[in-house]
């Protein structure tokens, strides 16, 4: 499986995690090219529908990132994001797709290393898990 | 207020007084015989028969007996309560005697005048009195609410209607607050330039009589220094609480950034570097960020803070040091006894109808735009010229956004006259300009209005019957596609200028104010009057009145008429020291109420609403008219109409049916308005109907629930007849409630084939012959099989 | 006594049996009916039920969605259900608890004994999933 290069969607919030990714770029830090960023106004905007739609289109993993707890710019958007991710993880586990293809990570804007670590870990995790099982089946 | 206060009454001590009415009653009814049997009833202390109860000696004697015997409830058998209830109430009120119950039983119009069989009529009268005695035992005292009247009024909106209303109120010596959202008063009227039917400028106002002349321009009328009148411009109403006689209003005054010292010298305007669209000229010209409207009242400059860049050049040059950038919004509280809403109209925006090309072609205007062009204070100083050319031909299109189902289905009433006014004005000044008016109907209904039509024809304005369909541009000229109905063919008119007679709509402020005050809008989106015929200036909220454009498209003369009428309504209300509310009202039992909101849905006056926090229904007594539709529809029976509780109605039914030997008695529920009036008139006209029909009066048939009808059958009634007002003319807005409840009772009774023996009749008060015929027909239906 | 109970009692005294159709404009007679397919899980009904007859269960009944009839797919939840189905590798057995902050998933449970048919839930229902069935049972056969 070593030649498997997973496709990972990362949802970023407009405030912290996207800025963290930016700062990582400014610092010229390296992270896997498997990750595609998708910017949302707030991590709370992440919808179960978006994630399911992504998996259905053959994405191998979804990472949701947002501001640190208590630091959401919209009061409790990141808590909502986390709740939705946990809920969907349960569903994905129950239907055998595997909830561990979905992950949520919070960081502040000044933590580019946290961002790099999150996406690197995510890539490693998905590499381990292999390609999207449904996509394989099709 | 009256929640959870189910009054306990002392032990009833009943006096029964029967009237022979000369011999109008005793001719048919054996009053003495009834009196003998009633005097043996429980709780009846005194029972007497009199020749005339309503003469002054007997009235005094009646009062004496009541005092001596400590009687607390009175049943009077005589004529219609609609005739004499007040006569009896008055003698006790004057002597400060509080009776718990006073009920008149109509044994004249409902018995002796409509029946011939003496024995049967006597039985019926006795049964009705039995019912009344039964009911009065359940009576409770009405809690009288007294409100001390605040001798001040608030007028919202300072257009032609609001300004006139406020002025008239101030003249009457009432402290009046005139609140206007814009920086200056005048409203749409200040913008229209010349006015019909008088062909002079629009902003005349009735002047103070001690001054010379019969009218003045509003900016010359000395409004700012008028006694009792306080003009508050640049101010909006934020909240209104309280009730008739005692409203507490919060208003917010926005900063003008100019203080009292401004003398309107205009130096600031010269140095201001910012230009913004001139809203007074409907955006057709520019003005500075610091500016003043043409003929402004109050005569002060203002800074348009949206446009201003705070360069403070004005502050440097102002010789009076009148510019103050530190101003902030200020909130004030007003206490007033009554409110007049005069928030006015706005013109329909024809850009929604793309086919007419408004805002697409600069030479397509509305009538109000044209009014600005023709006004000396307008964008072209009154010259009708575009790119230095006076149009050689003008086409006016009528009914744009009026009388169209997709936009507004009503006739806007003003646009025909505006078109005639402008056409005449232009023809007089530019005789060579060709003017064509494309119309469906020309409506000129007002004093001197038709003359304008004749004048326009004399000036050779062309009237083309047909609705224009489209405005196009071809080779720099506008083309109007229309139909000439006379010739029966489609035509294309080449023209330099198109003027759309756009319809009139309620202004945004009118709709917002309706929401803030809890007033309903009518189907045309104007504020709904309490009654379209007789209470046109009242609203469902007692103490809040409407006039001018807030209640419909209104021209200047009519706005002023309505304003004067509204001010008179307010002053007659504020002339009282206190407002005493003695209407019957519903009582909410908090133990039973769950806050399901059915009462709120059914109430036609938004008088009962569920408190979201407490989850209990709360009554606003000053809005309540006492119909009982809430009580009739409460699923938990938590709401009961005072003195018309289920128990009281059941008791009256039971009393009437107690002597129902032959099982032929019919119970009639009758509303106290048109239903009762038609029955009274049937008596006056001596129309006969069967003795089997016994009426129970209710404030409104909306009080009836299916159970009351079923209860009558349970007690052995042969039929139930209901008589109420004409559909849509219910005096309590109770809507379909009685109809639905009757339908439910019929559905239930269908199972035992009794559904035909329930019938609802609707009459207006004058239809006595129809009433009598219906009673005869119904008795026949009930008697069959 | 509730109005409907009083009516049933009086009707019985007159000798009436069976089921009565209640006119549309009247509230307080009949019971609520729930159309799950139209429910968008807003839980407004629970908040606005004055009788405490409606409870909104924060449970996403995963196994059940495979049994439901095919919907017209107009609601967002229909799209989500379709996506879940297409991602399914093994048939789920357990319902999933819906976390507190997640809106739009769950089931309406109605306690018909408590329902008085006032129609408040119907008036507040965003998805038109709740409707009072305008039928009154008097009982005792036809």
Image (tube, coloured by chain):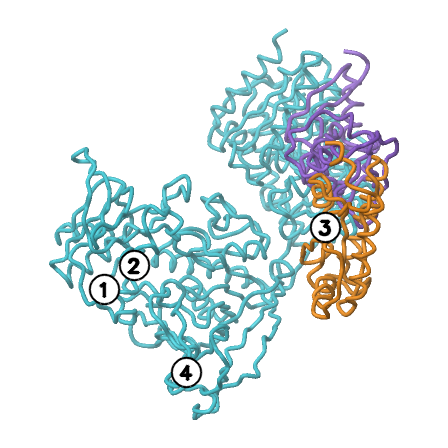
Check residue B272 in the rendering and tell me which mark sits there, or answer none: 4
| Quarter assignment of residue A1 | top right
Residue beneath disc 2? B362
Q: How far is disc 4 from disc 2 in space, using C-alphas? A: 28 Å
Q: Earlier in the sequence, mark 4 or mark 2?
A: 4
Residue beneath disc 3? A9
Circle 1 SS class = loop
Q: How far is disc 2 from disc 1 in space, using C-alphas? A: 9 Å
Q: How far is disc 3 from disc 2 in space, using C-alphas? A: 52 Å
Q: Are marks 2 and 1 in contact (CB under 8 Å)?
A: yes
Q: Are marks 3 and 2 on the same chain?
A: no
Q: Earlier in the sequence, mark 1 or mark 4?
A: 4
Residue beneath disc 1? B386
* Residue nearest the observer in this picture, B740 or B24: B740
Q: Residue at x 79, y 51 (%)?
A: B614
Circle 4 SS class = loop
Circle 3 SS class = strand
Q: Residues within 10 Å of mark 4 (few under 14, many from 20)?
A: many
Q: Residues within 10 Å of mark 2 (few under 14, many from 20)?
A: few
> Does residue C9 appear left or right of residue B103 in this picture?
right
Where is residue C136 shown, x and y percent of the image?
Answer: 74, 23
Q: Chain letter for orange?
A: A
> Does residue B225 appear left or right of residue B139 in this picture?
left
| Quarter assignment of residue B783 | top right
Q: Earlier in the sequence, mark 2 or mark 1?
A: 2
Q: Chain letter for purple?
A: C
Point out the residue furthest to the top here.
B785
Q: Are marks 3 and 1 on the same chain?
A: no
The mark closer to the camera, 3 or 4, is: 3
């Amino acid at each position: 499986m070593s030649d498997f290069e997973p496709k990972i969607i990362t949802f970023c919030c407009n405030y912290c995690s996207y800025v963290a990714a930016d700062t990582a770029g400014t610092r010229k830090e390296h992270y896997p090219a498997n990750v595609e960023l998708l910017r949302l106004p707030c991590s709370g905007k992440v919808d179960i529908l978006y994630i399911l739609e992504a998996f259905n289109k053959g994405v191998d993993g979804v990472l949701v990132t947002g501001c640190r707890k208590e630091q959401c710019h919209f009061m409790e958007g990141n808590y909502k994001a986390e709740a939705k991710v946990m809920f969907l993880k349960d569903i994905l586990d129950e239907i055998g797709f595997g909830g561990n293809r979905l992950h949520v990570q919070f960081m502040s804007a000044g933590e580019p290393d946290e961002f790099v670590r999150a996406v690197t870990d995510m890539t490693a995790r998905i590499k381990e898990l292999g390609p999207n099982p449904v996509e394989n089946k099709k | 207020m009256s929640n959870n206060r189910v009054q306990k009454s002392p032990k009833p001590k009943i006096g029964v007084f029967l009237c022979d009415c000369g011999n109008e009653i005793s001719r048919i009814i054996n009053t003495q015989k009834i009196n003998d049997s009633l005097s043996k009833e429980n709780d009846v202390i005194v029972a007497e028969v009199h020749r005339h109860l309503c003469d002054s000696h007997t009235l005094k004697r009646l009062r004496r007996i009541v005092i001596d015997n400590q009687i607390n409830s009175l049943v009077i058998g005589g004529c219609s309560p609609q005739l004499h209830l007040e006569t009896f109430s008055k003698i006790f009120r004057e002597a400060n005697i509080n009776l718990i119950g006073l009920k008149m039983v109509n044994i004249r119009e409902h018995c002796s005048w409509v029946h011939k069989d003496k024995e049967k009529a006597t039985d019926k009268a006795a049964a009705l009195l039995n019912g009344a005695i039964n009911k009065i035992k359940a009576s409770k005292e009405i809690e009288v609410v007294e409100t001390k009247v605040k001798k001040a009024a608030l007028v919202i909106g300072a257009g032609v209607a609001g300004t006139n209303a406020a002025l008239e109120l101030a003249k009457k010596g009432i402290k009046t607050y005139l609140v206007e959202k814009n920086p200056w008063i005048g409203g749409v009227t200040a913008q229209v330039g010349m006015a019909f039917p008088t062909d002079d400028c629009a902003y005349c106002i009735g002047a103070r009589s001690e001054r010379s002349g019969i009218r003045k321009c509003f900016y010359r009328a000395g409004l700012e220094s008028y006694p009792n009148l306080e003009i508050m411009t640049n101010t909006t109403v934020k909240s209104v609480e309280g009730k008739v006689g005692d409203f507490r209003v919060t208003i917010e005054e926005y900063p003008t950034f100019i203080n009292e010292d401004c003398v309107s010298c205009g130096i600031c305007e010269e140095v201001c570097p910012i230009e913004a669209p001139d809203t007074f000229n409907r955006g057709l010209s520019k003005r500075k960020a610091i500016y003043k409207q043409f003929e402004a009242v109050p005569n002060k400059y203002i800074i348009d803070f949206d446009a201003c860049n705070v360069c403070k050049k004005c502050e440097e040059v102002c010789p009076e040091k009148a510019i103050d950038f530190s101003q902030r919004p200020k909130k004030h509280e007003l206490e007033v006894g009554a409110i007049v809403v005069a928030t006015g109209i706005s013109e329909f925006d024809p850009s929604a109808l793309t086919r007419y090309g408004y805002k697409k072609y600069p030479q397509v205007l509305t009538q109000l735009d044209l009014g600005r062009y023709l006004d000396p204070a307008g964008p072209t100083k009154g010259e009708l010229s575009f790119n230095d050319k006076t149009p050689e031909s003008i086409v006016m299109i009528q009914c744009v956004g009026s009388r169209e189902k997709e936009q507004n289905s009503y006739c806007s009433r003003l646009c025909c006259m505006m078109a005639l006014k402008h056409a005449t004005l232009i023809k007089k000044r530019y005789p060579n300009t060709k003017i064509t008016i494309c119309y469906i109907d020309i409506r000129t209904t007002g004093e001197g209005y038709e003359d304008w039509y004749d004048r326009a024809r004399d000036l050779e304005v062309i009237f083309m019957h047909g609705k224009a369909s489209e405005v196009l541009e071809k080779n720099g000229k506008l083309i109007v596609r229309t139909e000439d109905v006379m010739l029966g063919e489609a035509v294309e008119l080449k023209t330099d200028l198109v003027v759309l007679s756009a319809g009139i709509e309620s202004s945004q402020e009118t709709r917002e104010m309706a929401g803030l005050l809890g007033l309903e809008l009518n189907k045309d989106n104007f504020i709904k009057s309490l009654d379209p015929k007789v209470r046109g200036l009242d609203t469902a909220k007692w103490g809040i009145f409407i006039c001018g454009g807030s209640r419909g498209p209104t021209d200047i003369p009519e706005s002023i008429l309505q304003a004067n009428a509204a001010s008179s309504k307010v002053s007659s209300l504020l002339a009282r020291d206190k407002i005493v509310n003695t209407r019957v009202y519903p009582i909410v039992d908090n133990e039973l109420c769950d806050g399901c909101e059915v009462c709120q849905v059914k109430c036609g006056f938004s008088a009962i609403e569920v408190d979201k926090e407490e989850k209990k229904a709360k009554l606003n007594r000053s809005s309540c008219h006492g119909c009982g539709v809430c009580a009739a529809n409460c699923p938990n029976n938590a709401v009961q109409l005072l003195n018309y509780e289920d128990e009281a109605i059941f008791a009256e039914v039971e009393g009437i049916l107690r002597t129902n030997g032959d099982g032929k008695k019919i119970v009639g529920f009758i509303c106290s308005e048109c239903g009762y009036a038609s029955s009274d008139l049937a008596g006056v006209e001596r129309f006969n109907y069967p003795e089997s029909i016994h009426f129970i009066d209710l404030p409104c048939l909306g009080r009836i629930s299916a159970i009351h009808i079923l209860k009558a059958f349970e007690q052995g009634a042969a039929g139930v007849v209901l008589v109420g007002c004409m559909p849509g003319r219910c005096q309590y807005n109770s809507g379909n409630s009685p109809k639905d409840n009757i339908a439910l009772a019929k559905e239930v009774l269908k199972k035992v084939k009794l559904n035909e023996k329930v019938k609802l009749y609707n009459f207006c008060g004058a239809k006595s012959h129809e009433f009598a015929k219906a009673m005869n027909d119904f008795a026949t239906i009930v008697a069959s099989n | 006594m509730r109005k409907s109970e009083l009516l049933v009692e009086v009707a019985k005294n007159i000798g009436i049996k069976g089921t009565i159709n209640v006119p549309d404009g009247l509230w307080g007679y009949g019971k609520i009916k729930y159309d799950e397919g139209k429910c968008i899980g807003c839980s407004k009904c629970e908040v606005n039920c004055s009788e405490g007859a409606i409870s909104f269960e924060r449970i996403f009944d995963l196994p059940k969605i495979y049994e439901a009839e095919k919907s017209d797919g107009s609601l967002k939840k229909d799209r989500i259900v379709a996506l879940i189905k297409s991602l399914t590798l093994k048939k789920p057995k357990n319902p999933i608890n819906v976390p507190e902050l997640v809106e739009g998933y769950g089931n309406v449970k109605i306690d018909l004994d408590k329902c008085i048919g006032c129609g408040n839930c119907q008036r507040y229902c965003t998805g038109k999933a709740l409707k009072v069935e305008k039928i009154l049972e008097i009982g005792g056969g036809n």
